Image (spheres, grey):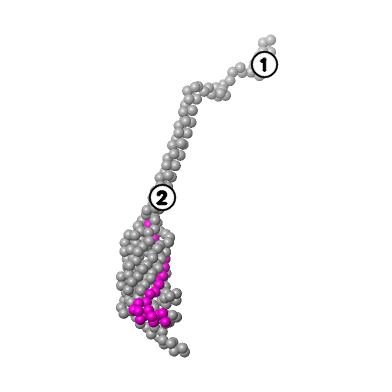
Amino acid sequence: MASTTAGNGSGSILPTHTTAATAPPFRTHKDADLESTTRRRRRRCLCCCLLVTLLLLFVLAITLLVLFLTVLRVRDPTTHLVSTRLIGLSPRLSFPAMSIQLNVTLLITVAVHNPNPASFTYATGGHTDLTYRGAHVGDADIDPGRIPSRGDANVTMALTLQADRFAGDLTQLVSDVMGGSVAVEASTRIPGRVAILGVFKRHAVAYSDCHLVFGVAEMGVRSQQCSDRTKL
């Protein structure tokens, strides 16, 4: 009997308990409450972050709306004729028609007021077309320049009148000259860039349509009526 028990002592006896490494952890009510509190805090933080983000987006939208209605709103400039001066007469005889062509060059200075909080800078490309009763009779190129924000600047152009082109309606031209004044239409287009607050830059085009009355005796502009606008 003793030998039988000794032979089975190491191989047939099974353990009757589990070790500490394999035993499942024991959770108390305190641990469950702590985990529930942590989850609630995380949800609360997430909701707070979401609300703050929505509030910032709302404030940003309101700010952009205010800027669009005030600072970014484009107001039309105003122009005023300062001076007109005759600077050139260039007669030319053309062959074989043996006709005489006469070009008259006027130096015109126009004061421009910019009511916008954005400066307007224009390079080459500004141009003025002059028409008399629908016929193109002259043009002018505008030199580069800059008009400050909420400021004034002078725009100078050399306007060349091609007198022979007035002959298309010679009877009416003679009548106008005898009356002492000649009415023409001037259309101006100036492409450039506006700088808002010195940071934001956008392409813009300034337009001006004017009705001009040239006085024959004074060889200058007697009166003007202009419609000015700017398009972004």
- Residue type indicated by callout 2: Leu
Residue at image point 31% right, 79% down: 217
Residue furthest out toward the top? 1
Tell me residue 160's x, y (percent): 38, 77
Near-viewer residue (72 or 7): 72
Near-viewer residue (230 or 49): 230
Front label number (1 vs 2):
2
Earlier residue among tags 1 and 2: 1
User: Label 1: how many residues lie within 10 Å, few (<14), some (14-19) or many (20+)?
Assistant: few
Say which residue label 1 marks. 8
Residue at image point 53% right, 24% down: 25
Q: Is residue 198 visible?
A: no
Please identify the quarter of the rendering in which residue 163 is found: bottom left
- Quarter of the image where the N terminus is located: top right
Residue at image point 45% right, 74% down: 134
- Quarter of the image where the C terminus is located: bottom left
Q: Is residue 83 visible?
A: yes
Residue 124 is tagged as none
Please identify the quarter of the rendering in which residue 129 is found: bottom left
Question: Secondary structure beneath disc 2?
Answer: helix
Is 179 contained in the magenta span? yes
- Residue type indicated by callout 1: Asn
Is 156 contained in the magenta span? no
Say which residue label 2 marks. 65
Tell me residue 34's x, y (percent): 47, 26
Above-or-below relation of 33 to 132: above
The magenta stretch is 171-196
The residues bearing labels 1 and 2 have C-alpha atoms spaced at a distance of 91 Å
Residue at image point 49% right, 28% down: 36
Question: Secondary structure beneath disc 1?
Answer: loop
